[in-house]
Image (tube, rainbow, N blue to C red):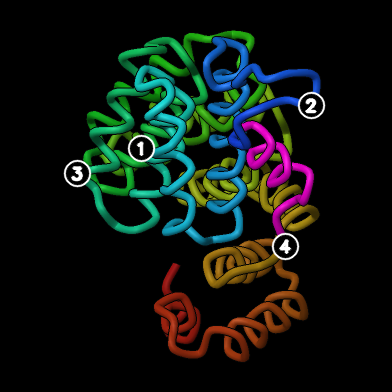
Amino acid sequence: MTLRPALLLLVVSLLAGCVTTGDVDPMRTAEGREKARDSFIQLGIAYIQQGDTQRAKVPLKSALDLDSSNADAHAALALAFQLEMEPQLADEHFRKALSLRPKDARLLNNYGGFLFEQKRYQEAMNTYLKAAEDNLYPERSRVFENLGMTALQLGQREQAKEYFQRSLRLSNRQRRSLLEMAVLSYEDKEYVPARRYYDSYSEIAPQNARSLLLGARLANVFEDRDRAASLGLQLRRLYPASQEYQQFVSGQQ
């Protein structure tokens, strides 16, 4: 992926110092500074999407030089530092962004993901719960999925199931929710719903070691020996060193 030429041209033109219709410096007007700030943020995000966080920080810093209280610039910098494994700086900019927009569900969800990554699970739970309060957030199903994953880490198994179910009510194509519900249902010996969740997951997501093991176990429950063998072979071929394959070989249920 390459940066859009129009985006680069916009940044350059805003910094050129004048417009063709006169001698007015656009950077001296509120509108000009706002356009330059937003262009810097877009450029920084584009670099992040390319995986070039080092370059991303330059335009994002320029955006903050123009407007130190811009939540989007702080949020983008937080993501850059998160990717660079600089948790203290990432946390600092996430907090600055949220101090400016404390009810922004997208920011809250992203910050929750950062906290989860840092194994700060209770803080992540509290942050995701705030994000879930926004009934109009278009990614609310992901928030509940994240709540479910966090609840599992906190040992709150039944609460996790409720969150995954809420996620799937909002969107029945949430992959992790489908797989987790399949696993949890299997563990509870609720094999029919487990197979339903597993089949729905298999229709939209690639198999991994965990799903292949679950699929083989469900096939054995329903006495589908051919399918169980086929999934077992895939598990051996794709993930021979995995814990899941060792469990399959030993026949652990």
> Which of the marked residues, 4 or 2, is nearer the chain's N terminus?
4
- Vertical position of residue 234 compared to residue 117: above or below: below
Secondary structure of the residue carrying tag 3 is helix
The answer for how far apart the CA atoms under marks 4 and 3 are is 30 Å
Q: Is residue 233 magenta?
A: no
Give the image location of residue 204, x and y in percent. 77, 53
The answer for how far apart the CA atoms under marks 3 and 1 are is 21 Å
Q: Quadrant of the C terminus?
A: bottom left
Q: Nearer the viewer, residue 31 or 140?
A: 31
Q: Nearer the viewer, mark 3 or mark 1?
A: 3
The answer for how far apart the CA atoms under marks 2 and 3 are is 45 Å
Horizontal side, residue 3 vs residue 151: left or right: right
The local crowd at label 4, few if under 14, some if 14 to 19, many if 20 or more residues have their Cα within 10 Å, is: few
Horizontal side, residue 86 vs residue 47: left or right: left
| Image marks 2 and 1: residues in contact by CB distance under 8 Å | no
> Which of the marked residues, 1 or 4, is nearer the chain's N terminus?
4
Give the image location of residue 59, x and y in percent. 48, 43
> Which of the marked residues, 2 or 3, is nearer the chain's N terminus?
2
Task: Say which mark, if any, is on residue 110.
Answer: none
Question: Residue under circle 2?
Answer: 20
> Which of the marked residues, 4 or 3, is nearer the chain's N terminus?
4
- Vertical position of residue 183 compared to residue 2: above or below: above
Q: Nearer the viewer, mark 2 or mark 3?
A: 2
Q: Residue drawn at (51%, 25%), measured in percent from left and top? A: 106
The answer for how far apart the CA atoms under marks 4 and 2 are is 32 Å
Question: Residue under circle 3?
Answer: 88
| Magenta-highlighted residues | 1-14
Q: Nearer the viewer, mark 1 or mark 4?
A: 4
Question: Residue under circle 4?
Answer: 1
The answer for how far apart the CA atoms under marks 1 and 4 are is 34 Å
Question: Residue under circle 1?
Answer: 150
